C-alpha cells in the first residue's frame, strides 16, 4: 500500500495498482480494531461506488502506512456497514 495525503494505492495479486481515496477511519471497542473505508479516487460526487473496508493495526503506523486486513466475520461486517450507513446519513444532513 502506498500513500499520498488521503489517497492510497492498493496493489492486487497480479501487481495491478488502483488509486483509492480514504473515506474515513474509525476504531471499534467491540472488536478492538481500527478500520479504514476506501472509495475509488476517480469517483464523482453522487456517483454510486463500491466502498472497500479493511481492518488495520494502528500500532504499525498510520492508516496510510499500515498493512490492511480483510474483514472475514459476518458480525464484524454488519458493524462496519452500520458505521458506514451512519456516516452516509450524516453526510446527507449536512
Image (tube, rainbow, N blue to C red):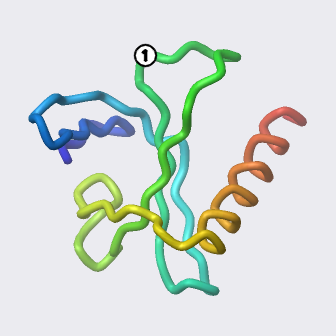
Q: In this view, which residue lies farthest toward the left?
A: 15
Name the image quarter holding the C terminus. Answer: top right
Residue at the image point whose x is 18% and y is 39% from the top: 11
Residue ID at (20%, 40%): 12
Q: Residue at x 56, y 84 (%)?
A: 31
Residue 75 versus residue 7 in the image, above or below: below
Percent coordinates x, y for residue 28 in the rendering: 59, 77
Instruction: Bin the neighbour count of mark 1 within 10 Å (Cα to Cα): few under 14, some 14-19, many 20 and up.
Output: few
Residue at (24% x, 36% y) in the render: 9
| Closer-to-camera residue (25/10) | 10
Query: Where in the figure is residue 65, as x and y percent of width and height?
Result: 23, 57
Position of residue 58 relative to residue 18, above or below, is below
Q: As drawn, is 61 to the left or to the right of 16?
A: right
Q: Is residue 31 left or right of residue 8?
A: right
Considering every residue shown, the one lying at the far right of the view is 93
Which residue is identified by label 1? 42
Circle 1: element type: loop
Q: Indicate the position of residue 89 as horizontal and vertical percent values.
A: 84, 42
* Residue 55 placement: quadrant: bottom left
Position of residue 2 measured from the top left corner of the image (x, y, whole percent): 18, 43
Amino acid at each position: 500500500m502506498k500513500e499520498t495525503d488521503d489517497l492510497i494505492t492498493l496493489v492486487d495479486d497480479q501487481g495491478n495498482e488502483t488509486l483509492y481515496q480514504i473515506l474515513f477511519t474509525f476504531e471499534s471497542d467491540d472488536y478492538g480494531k481500527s478500520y479504514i473505508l476506501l472509495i475509488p479516487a476517480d469517483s464523482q460526487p453522487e456517483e454510486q461506488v463500491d466502498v472497500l473496508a479493511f481492518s488495520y493495526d494502528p500500532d504499525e503506523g498510520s492508516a496510510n502506512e499500515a498493512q490492511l486486513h480483510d474483514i472475514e466475520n459476518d458480525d464484524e461486517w454488519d458493524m462496519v456497514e452500520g458505521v458506514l450507513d451512519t456516516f452516509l446519513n450524516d453526510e446527507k444532513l449536512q
